[in-house]
Image (cartoon, rainbow, N blue to C red):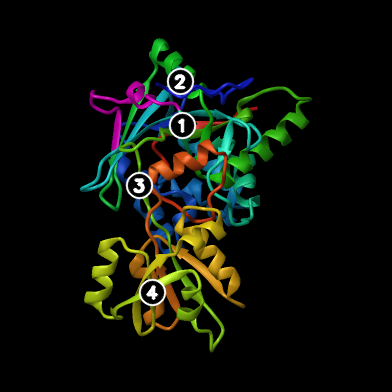
Amino acid sequence: MPVVWYAESMPGFEPFAGLRYDPSVPLDAVIAPPYDVVGPEERAELASRHRANAIHVELPAEEPSMGLDRYANAARLLGEWTEKGTLLEDATPAFYGYRMTAPGASPTTGVIGALACEPIGGDILPHEQTIPKDRSDRLDLLRAARANLSPIWGLSLTEGLATLYRQTEPADAKATDDDGVLHELWVMDDPALIEAIRVSVGSSPVVIADGHHRYETALAYQAERRAARDGARGDYDLVMALVVELAPGQLTVGPIHRTIVVPSGTDLVEAFSRWFDLVRAGPVDEDVVNAVADSGALALVTASDVWLLTAREEAYTAAESDLDSSILAMVAKEIPGAAVEYNHDWRTVVSAVVAGGAQAAVLIRPVTVEQIGDWAHARRRMPPKSTYFFPKPRTGMVFRPVRG
């Protein structure tokens, strides 16, 4: 039976009239990854592909010849693209079915709409503890551009939601990104379907899976606009979100591995042995590391050795958690001067150790969908960087104006 949530209210989820590229614009050439995974070199390459590539507004540059800072330039470009017909606004509000299919993987399918901005902890639940990040950049961009450019990612606890937005007809728009992921978008403007999706998403809490800082930025902007307009409601009361049912087969969850930098003389094998049983898998060579990584094992990689890690029961008890990331956070806190960095690519963290940029790497196992659901139902936040959701929604499939 479906889970029924009893509360005074549940998250609002509304259709909107999106801004989308004219069909004559090659969508492959104008979509871009989310801003927080794009480095300077990739930004330059994306910007060179097309004058209207979404990166020009997602990560804008100054326009000194016009005396415009980054944010004013983003607003200018959005206005220019709209005036010239590069971007067209849909005639009526709609939800947007969205499917991402990576090579050799099951597709991730959800629905893009406008999620009500509510304080985190009620009907909108946090998924992970977040590492502090400056929000002024995204807030300045939202103030100037007055548009949601990329969706946050929410997980709905409503069972059976996916049956409503699953599509069998050809997509209204599709593009393939640089990783070979096919992105498909459907405009869903049928009133009966819109109402069914609204009710279904609104019947359970939504867990913020990706985009915590963008959601917090939307809350800050909402407060600003309400204060400026004597509490009046407007587009700023919602934020564009991709909502996916939290269920096995509906999304792909990968691990986020760690590198550890410690002061000279620190014995990391000894530090880990307090909470883990360690078995040496072999030296740090390509065959051993590849075998361990392919097996999906929890492992410690030092400059000389690869160790398989098995957490002891008392480690989970001490961490009050069933997650590898919780125990690793506990270990790191016990090591004086330890600094931890994160990357979803195991080759990157191992290379950092081989090159001498870190003393060790930890390859962790992905969190399961069931674990995410258990933590969500318990209203608990996972430790930072516990999950990596893949593929990532592309900026440019649809934009949401935020007027008023």
Determine if the magenta segment contains residue 285.
no
Helix, strand or loop at mark 2: helix
Q: Is residue 250 visible?
A: yes
Q: Quadrant of the N terminus?
A: top left
Are there few (<14), some (14-19), or many (20+) residues within 10 Å of tag 2?
some
Residue type at numbered disc 3? Pro
Q: Nearer the viewer, residue 140 or 248?
A: 248
Are there few (<14), some (14-19), or many (20+) residues within 10 Å of tag 1?
many
Residue type at numbered disc 1? Ser
- Which residue in the protein does label 1 denote? 156
Task: Report how far apart the C-alphas of labels 3 and 1 lie in the structure.
Answer: 18 Å
- Which residue in the protein does label 3 denote? 391
- Which disc is residue 278 wearing? 4
Q: Earlier in the sequence, mark 1 or mark 4?
A: 1
Task: Report how far apart the C-alphas of labels 2 and 4 lie in the structure.
Answer: 47 Å
Q: How many marks?
A: 4
Task: Report how far apart the C-alphas of labels 1 and 2 lie in the structure.
Answer: 9 Å
Residue type at numbered disc 4? Leu
Task: Report how far apart the C-alphas of labels 2 and 3 lie in the structure.
Answer: 24 Å
Helix, strand or loop at mark 4: strand
Q: Earlier in the sequence, mark 2 or mark 3?
A: 2
Mark 3 or 4: in front is: 4
Mark 3 or 1: in front is: 1
Magenta stretch bounds: 158-174
Are there few (<14), some (14-19), or many (20+) residues within 10 Å of tag 4?
some
* Magenta-colored segment: predominant secondary structure: loop
Give the residue at x 58% y 52%: 130
Question: Extreme top residue here?
Answer: 192
- Which disc is residue 398 wearing? none
- Which disc is residue 200 wearing? 2
Helix, strand or loop at mark 1: strand
Q: Earlier in the sequence, mark 3 or mark 1?
A: 1
